[in-house]
Image (spheres, rainbow, N blue to C red):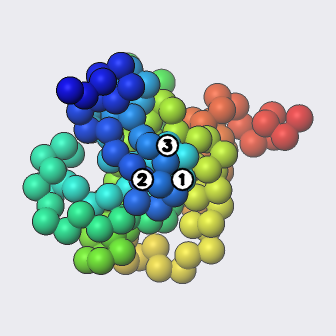
Amino acid sequence: MRNHSLASFGDFRCANCRALVSSMQMLSGVNNRNHCPYCLWSRHLDLYSAGDRLSACKAPMNPIGLTMKRSRNKYQLSPRGELMLVHACLECDTVSINRIAADDDPERILAVFHSSLDVSQHGIYEQNGITMLDAGDMDAVYHQLYGQAVENSMA
């Protein structure tokens, strides 16, 4: 019999860093966890919609950048939308976006953002309807991660 106090249905071992990842919504704040909160790598699980788990690929997905998902919520604080991770599948080149979870490492998210600034192929992702954030979005990224702009976070 499985000990449910230590693990829950859907817990997994990260394909990249091998950390044990909890899928408990209480910890992550998301319904369909498929990326590691430590290294941010994901797994190609979904095919048509978040949580469907219909993809036959199952390959690791590299976090390659950040984007904003616009919300239809008229009471949302940020007019730009929700900060999202962009992942690229190592096997089939599928590109997808994932919600940032409450327990994701903000420093690692920031590192993904900074490394994506060197990428010259952002146009490829735009073909998939994903607009990657660039250097001009730095204040928005810091604000969403830390609740303050870049200048204030450096103090």
Which residue bears the numbered disc 3? 37
Which residue bears the numbered disc 2? 14
**Which picture quadrant has residue 135?**
bottom right
From the image, state whether disc 2 or disc 3 is nearer to you: 2
* Residue 82 visible, this orientation: no
Label 2 or label 3, whichever comes before in sequence order: 2
**Which picture quadrant has residue 60?**
bottom left
In this rendering, the answer to whether 100 lies above or below 103 is: below
Q: Residue at x 44, y 65 (%)?
A: 62
Give how far apart the Cα atoms at labels 3 and 1 are: 6 Å
Q: Which mark is residue 39?
A: 1
Front residue of 71 and 116:
116
The image shows residue 43 at horizontal and vertical percentages of 32, 58
The image shows residue 24 at horizontal and vertical percentages of 34, 27
Residue 115 relative to residue 96: left or right:
right
Q: Secondary structure at mark 3?
A: loop
- The amino acid on which the numbered mark 3 sits, given as a three-letter code, is Pro
Q: Residue at x 57, y 66 (%)?
A: 116
* Residue 106 visible, this orientation: yes
Front residue of 77 and 111:
111
The image shows residue 65 at horizontal and vertical percentages of 50, 61
Number of other residues with Cα within 10 Å of mark 1, as a class: few under 14, some 14 to 19, many 20 or more: some
Give how far apart the Cα atoms at labels 2 and 3 are: 9 Å
- The amino acid on which the numbered mark 1 sits, given as a three-letter code, is Cys
User: Cβ–Cβ below 8 Å for labels 2 and 3?
Assistant: no
Residue 65 relative to residue 6: left or right:
right
In this rendering, the answer to whether 24 lies above or below 83 is: above
Label 2 or label 1, whichever comes before in sequence order: 2
- The amino acid on which the numbered mark 2 sits, given as a three-letter code, is Cys
